[in-house]
Amino acid sequence: MTKLLIEKELKNILLSPKFVATFLVCSILILTSVYIGIQEYHNAVTQFEANQQIARQDIEQASNWNRVRNIAHRAPSPMQVFVSGLHFDIGRLSGISDFQDIKLIRSPYSDETLFAIFRFIDFAFIVQVVLSLFAILFTYDAINGERENGTLKLTFANSVSRAQYLISKFVGIWLGLIVPLLIPILIGLLLIMILDVPVSGTEWISIGSFIGLSVLYITFFIGVGILVSSLTRKSSLSFLLLLVIWIGGVLILPRMSIMAAGQLVPVQSVAQLESKQEAFRRARWDQYSSQLSQKWRARSEEMSGMTNEERQAYRDDKEWEWLEEDDAARKQVQIDITDNNRKLIEETDNRKKIQEQLAFNLARISPASSFRLAAMNLAGTDIDMKNRYEESMRAYRDDFVEYTEQKQAESGNQGGFRINVSSDSGVKIDFGRDDQTLDTSGMPQYTAPVVTAGMAVSSSILDFGLMGIFIIIIFGAAFLAFLRYDMR
């Protein structure tokens, strides 16, 4: 009997006009989003390679190690085809030098503001918004619609238990929705391989996990539809209630959680952080300039009463000592600025992590938030993406600065410049030879942070678990509601 009930439900779904419309809409959306995502990925790779080539040429054309300016670029990921996450929102590159802190700039949305208005439709968005809405469309009258048509009493005129009927109803709806949708998903994966998107084994694991997460998410909304349909006697009322639940859970609750966390745990803005960094930088350089002026006045006083020949001889004797002393003071200023920047960033990041954790915990009341967070974690386009890249770039900057300083020392220009003082020409700064060719063969290269499959899946375990708990609770509630349902 169970098999007959499943076949009946499956046939009703597959032969209904709304299934044909739903299947066509979802297929078009999924395949279009995957294709556009692939094209966007290839464009991003082309731009990434061109920018890297330009950065290498700038380094090779530099004539002095003090003038070398490096740039680290954020590489595009194939996972952005399915879950764009924060890929379009955070910057794509950062300058690498001892004169500035790491900061990702020039996000794709900052260059293409039109797309920032309407945002990018990826597969995760289609599942979160479109497919969940279609799941409600197919289940809002699962029980009360049968009562209104008179088929519910007719079914139970046979030897069918309520548990058996409810399970058959769920399995039929689930097969009718999930299995056909796997067709455009498989075609999308085929496009990935045909259009030469380099997907690694780790990324295939993440893609498989993401598809499994999507199935769980749709399953939850199937359960919600059956539950509400079991609690109401009119299908029109259940549809209205489900629409309110969907709007609240998918669109409103996640945003309210962010707003609540922002009020409970305030964090200084980027503008405030940069203002503090800039204020300290100016104060520290002003202090250095003042100290340098005092040093040179003291050095001039040391030469008071000397003849011009004695002054020149004294300068020649003390020049290297003064250069080393001034360069050490200059480097200490830069170290102090860098340390202060990192301290302020660390304090802000720690505060922000507390705020983010609170926001995520509040938002996870909604399965839509759990789905979104888990999808971004699996794709590596999560909230920590910016921090991962900036931390790896800071580590690279330390290696790069150490390497350039070593090269400066080997070239006989340790400080990167030389100050010449004479009575005829005054103070002249010599940055070294401009006709030399730099050997960059041993220069360290930036390596992007790697998110392994284990890291991606482990960071999503909580949301997978919550999704499973939500499904168990919702189907338990639906079963209890149907046990008490009045079939008259």
Image: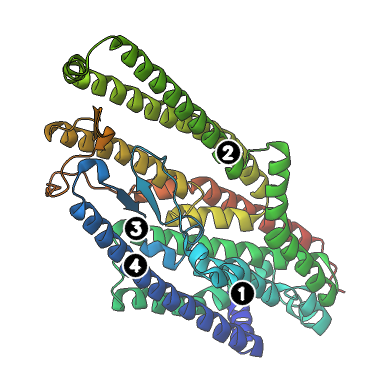
**Residue contact between numbered discs 1 and 3, judged by CB atoms under 8 Å:** no
Q: In this view, does 462 lie above or below 286?
A: below
> Label 2: which residue?
275
C-alpha gap between disc 2 and disc 1: 57 Å
Q: Which residue has dot 3 on it?
A: 75
* Cα gap from disc 4 to disc 3, whole angstroms: 10 Å
The x, y position of residue 394, in whole percent, is 36, 39
Residue underneath mark 4: 47
Identified by mark 1, the residue type is Ile
Under circle 2, the secondary element is helix
Image quarter where the C terminus lies is: bottom right
Q: Which of marks 4 and 3 is in front?
A: 4
Counting residues from the N terminus, which is met first, the one under dot 4 or under dot 1?
Answer: 4
Residue nearest the observer in this picture, 177 or 115: 115
Identity, as a three-letter code, of the amino acid under mark 4: Gln
Tag 3 or tag 1, which sits nearer the N-term?
3
Q: Earlier in the sequence, mark 4 or mark 2?
A: 4
Q: How far apart are marks 4 and 2 (CA)?
A: 32 Å
Report the front residue among 199 and 155.
199
Q: Nearer the viewer, residue 273 or 254?
A: 273
- Other residues around mark 2 within 10 Å, as few (<14) / some (14–19) / many (≥20): few
Which amino acid type is shown beneath numbered disc 2? Ser
Residue 213 image offset from top left, x and y in percent: 51, 60
Please tell me whether residue 137 is drawn above or below residue 211 in the rendered image.
below
Q: Can residue 471 be seen in this view?
A: no
User: Against 475, is 469 above or below?
Assistant: above
**What residue type is disc 3 on?**
Ala
